[in-house]
Amino acid sequence: MKDDRTTQIVLAAIAILLVVGFFLPNWAMFLLTIALAKGMLVLGLLPLMRTGLVSFGHALYYCLGAYAAGGLGIAWGISDVILMMLAGGLAAAVVSFVLGFLLSRYRGIFFGLLSLAFSMILYGVLVKSESLGSTDGFNVVKFTLFGIRPDDEMVRFTMLAVAAVTCGIAALALHRYLGTPLGLLAPAIRDNEIRVEYMGGSARYAIHVIYVISATLAGVAGALVGAAVGHIDPEMAYWTQSGEFVFIAILAGTGSVIAPFIGAIVFAVIHSFAFDFSPNTWQMVLGGALFLIIVFLPNGLWSLFGRRLRARG
Amino acid sequence: MAQNTSNYILEATGLNKSFGAVTAAKDINISIERDAFVGLIGTNGAGKTTFINMVTGYLKPDAGTIVYDGLDITALQPRDITRMGICRSFQIPQLYNSLTVFENMMVGLGVVLHHAGRGGFFSRGEALVPGSEKPLHVVADEILARFDLSSYRGRPAQILPGGVRKLLDIAMTMVASPKILLLDEPTSGVSAEEKFGIMEMVMNAVKQAGATVLFVEHDMEVVSRFSQRVIAFYDGRVICDAPPDVALNDAEVQRYVIGGHRAQG
């Protein structure tokens, strides 16, 4: 068996984020929190991509998670960020469980476009829903943690800490899952689905389970972003948002559960600085970065780290 | 479930299969005894692989039934048939090319564990494979050793030589503890010198597993040496079903199946 240091790396990363994060300026804490949340969503795309499926519609669950979290505050005045994330994950899990029966039947471009269609349906419904703020969305109640509202100076750090710990737990859980018999099926399905069936496995069942896990992570990520930003709107379900997640996934690679977080942080840095230096042409910088990654690192940024780890191991 | 007392582990009755105007199987009636080693012969397009595809659920017959150990499996899906103990290898090896040889085995064993309810989130690699009651990686290594594949353990399947790919394809069928093994041309694409060695290895491994074997083969020397019974196909029909010394000397088999082979050598 390979010498696997993923658990140690994830735990070390959480510790570093908690220590170093405390000394970061507020804007950097916020940037990092959002990047981690998006990293968690892309983490959910990882097992799907390992089966050879690319979802162009995960913004559906990202938005659904955010609206579920925001809805808790509106309907019941619940502001606890943990409960918000649970609500976001649960809403996404339920919807993905239902849609999964249909989506697990499709492969390739059909899977991608069908998933996109569902996210655009949600977008269409939300922009027409005046009770949910229509195109403007609505503000999320200020979050609390275990019933306590952090001081103003500690709000950003608290949210960063919540994001770091949640992402760490998600990464370790998914890492564990990928080592289970069902998790091992993901690359096998991509390589040879017929053989999977002839070994007694059900590719559809495996894809359905992976899809629900993936969507649940997206829902939690959406809730986290909703609580951190304090405002949600239908743009979270728009197809360009799904495109951004796929962009990060390609940038990161699927080699490890750590990769999505590296990808999301690098994306956030490129995006922020490109926008800062070149407000009108920042998309060109992003496009150029993706071009370079595809040409020189077809397995994503993680291949840089993977090579180093292999060389040491 | 009632115990099946029949001496036959597999009974195909009245199988018919057509693809448009082409008839691939015409009234196929075959019964296979337990622990038998049966050679299936015939020219290309004679119906051998169609028969295997129908038994393993890949193709549904237009008419007829297939009974395995007393149960009608005609309408079942390939995965359900595999779980019952009917496993197959392929003429062109069907591997997980991006995975290593060891990982190829682990995928199959993982499926077995999952369906035994032992491969849950909290058990992972510590779960024991049903039957052998050994950990996953131990069973994988044992099967690889049985097929002399241990030295290829860490290599990606994509870069394996042809003969090794063939062996791995067959080794992967062993993870599900097959009761019936259908081998589709186990020595095709393998050099003449390697053929007998591969067949010896495969047959020894299969005997250890206690499986009934049906194998499609074009090399009549391999057929006569490794089969106890030969079923010859021609034009979608069974034209002979007899022990190898009788079948290989049958006039119709000589005319429609062997002809060219014997002449060559």
Image (cartoon, rainbow, N blue to C red):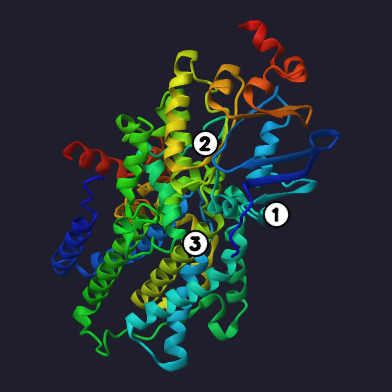
Label 1 residue SS: loop
Residue A270 visible here: yes
Label 2 residue SS: loop
- Real-space Cα distance between discs 1 and 2? 24 Å
The quarter of the rendered structure image containing the N terminus of chain B is: bottom right
- Real-space Cα distance between discs 1 and 3? 29 Å
- Closest to the observer, A114 or B29: B29
What's under tag 1, amino acid-wise? Ala
Q: Are marks 1 and 3 in contact (CB under 8 Å)?
A: no
Residue A46 visible here: no
Q: Indicate the chain on which mark 3 is placed.
A: A
Q: Which residue is mark 1?
A: B75
Q: Which residue is mark 2?
A: B94
- Closest to the observer, B265 or A95: B265
Q: Indicate the chain on which mark 2 is placed.
A: B
What's under tag 3, amino acid-wise? Tyr
